[in-house]
Amino acid sequence: MVFCIGAILLPGCLALPIPSHAVYEGREIDTKSLGWLQSGVTTRSEVLGHLGDPDVYFVDEHVYGYSWAGKSADVLVVIGMQGSEMHVPMRGAFLVQFNEADKVIRYGVVDRPAFAPLSLSGVVNFSPWTETVEGWLSKQSSQSSNDAFDKDKKVR
């Protein structure tokens, strides 16, 4: 990104964004296509039927995670008579949480960090997933608390 900003500021340089959305890994899930999914109604088996097996499952939190990666755009950088193309990376995850009765509690799309699933020793490294899920759950809980507080505040 610093290179692009520098390229814009230098004489004879140009950085031109080019919309170019592509998914290279996984299947991107857009919440607009999830009309069938309803909190408190949709079951775990229905989610599996529509989306297939998740990429990751957090047993204690009852959360399924589906991930994808690709690019959201390209940037053409031209300096003098030479140019090159740079990709703007995109990484996302769709998370869905269930209650003990296997009904959907909440769901949403989050940005996920880049990570290598295997460490040098060949052991699976789930810490980036754990951080992503914990952050999402924390944010969801605070929003629910704020919503409940706001409703209480309006009633008074």
Image: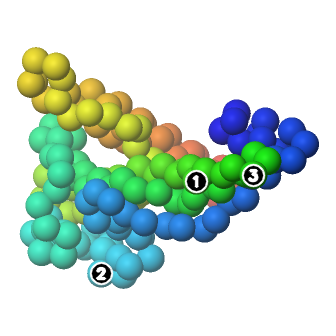
| Residue sitting nearer the eye, 133 or 10 | 10
Q: Mark 1 points at which residue?
A: 85
Closer mark to the observer between disc 3 and disc 1? 3
Quarter of the image where the N terminus is located:
top right
Q: What residue type is labelled 2?
A: Trp
Compared to residue 42, the image places residue 53 above or below, namely: above
When asked about the image quadrant of residue 107, the answer is bottom left
Question: What colouring does the structure picture have?
Answer: rainbow
Identify residue type, mark 3. Met
The percent coordinates of residue 144 (x first, y second) are 48, 49
Say what secondary structure mark 3 lies in: loop
Q: Mark 2 points at which residue?
A: 36
Which residue is depicted at the point 32% across and 34% down?
A: 115
Residue type at mark 1: give it: Glu
Task: State the residue in front, 30 or 47.
Answer: 30
Confirm or deny contact between disc 3 and disc 1 (CB under 8 A). Answer: no
- Residue identifier under label 3: 81
Which residue in the rendered view is the most extreme toward the front?
81
Mark 3, Cα crowd under 10 Å, few <14 / some 14-19 / many 20+, is: few
Looking at the image, can residue 15 be seen?
yes
